[in-house]
Amino acid sequence: MKILIASDMEGVTGVVDWDHVMPDRPDYPRFCRLLTGDINAAVRGAFAGGASAVAVTDGHNTSRNILIEELDERASLNCGSPLTLLSMVHGVDQGVDGVLFIGYHARAGAQNAVLDHTWSDARVANLWINDRLFGEAALNAGVCGHFDAPVLMISGDQTACAEARDMLGDLETAIVKRAVGRMAAECLPPAVTAELIERAAQRAVERLKAGNAPAPFKVEPPITLTLELAKSEMADKAMTLPGARRVQDRKIQYTAGDMLETYHAFRALVGMAR
Ligand SMILES: [Zn+2]
């Protein structure tokens, strides 16, 4: 049973500020170590639950955050920027049986959510897919679903975990902190969160083995993506994508045949909206 661990960083143990997750800030190295600790806990849990292989994809920012010298030696690491067409879920097309999301955060605009955003804090105000608000968890889960891989577990704050359960169904959760604002949370120490993450990952893989895991998250075509950008100027620039429609001042729509095309269109629009 092959498991992919797809990581982000804003939902990692102890993270409450951009200073913790941006490479040019002095606090960043500490949080790379904490990220690696959360990942290792998930690796241990996945193998304890019956995984035969575990690959890890470093999905935050430049994809160079996880400390490979401290990574559990049974796992492999996908890292380096840019991480091909599948980005945060790179590797999910390689015959993966289930996916664990580690260090995830809530969608842009969510209340009591550490560093809530959707892909780009500066550019994306809102993302709807088929008229439903999507954050990164649902967006990436849709790509996993395209390849028939279910998302089995998520770790992050209580709002990220609740959002994932609302969108993706009955997956396992590890709440490593309770957000009380955007830049503040009641955080559990790493010795405690490692236990929570390991247990959740183990349960997640055991359920997959027992045929009791959540189904892959499928978004039915045709898929309408509606992207609200932060400024109208960004929408002006994003309109150079063929097929993009300006439906309102800062809102662009695009219709896709499947979730993979949706993902590519979304990333292209955000990339152009600088
Ligand atoms: Zn991130």
Image (tube, rainbow, N blue to C red):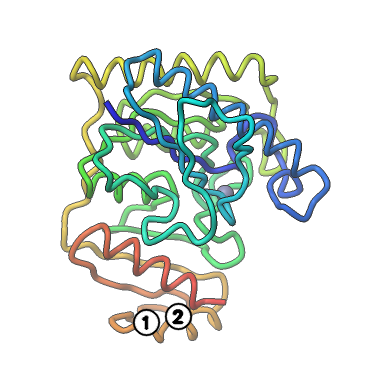
Residue 183 picture location, percent across and down = 71, 42
- Looking at the picture, which amino acid does disc 1 mark? Leu
Residue tagged 2:
238
Residue 250 picture location, percent across and down = 48, 76
Q: Is residue 176 above or below residue 202?
A: below
Q: Name the residue rendered at 46%, 68% in the picture.
A: 228
Q: Quadrant of residue 176?
A: top right
Residue 23 picture location, percent across and down = 72, 52
Q: Quadrant of the N terminus?
A: top left
Q: Is residue 153 above or below residue 90?
A: above
Q: Name the residue rendered at 25%, 32% in the picture.
A: 97
Question: What secondary structure is marked by label 1?
Answer: loop
Front residue of this view, candidates 266 and 69: 69
Front residue of this view, candidates 194 and 158: 194
Tell me if the residue at label 1 has its CB under 8 Å from ligand 1: no
Horizontal side, residue 126 vs residue 13: left or right: left
Is disc 2 in contact with disc 1, using a CB cutoff of under 8 Å? yes
Horizontal side, residue 232 vs residue 153: left or right: right
Horizontal side, residue 259 vs residue 140: left or right: left
Q: Is residue 167 above or below residue 231?
A: above
Q: Quadrant of residue 62?
A: bottom right
Residue 162 picture location, percent across and down = 44, 32
- Looking at the picture, which amino acid does disc 2 mark? Ala
Q: Name the residue rendered at 63%, 41% in the picture.
A: 114
Q: Is residue 258 above or below residue 229?
A: above
Which residue in the rendered view is the most extreme toward the right?
A: 26
Q: Which mark is residue 241?
A: 1
Circle 2: is it few (<14), some (14-19), or many (20+) Cα within 10 Å? many
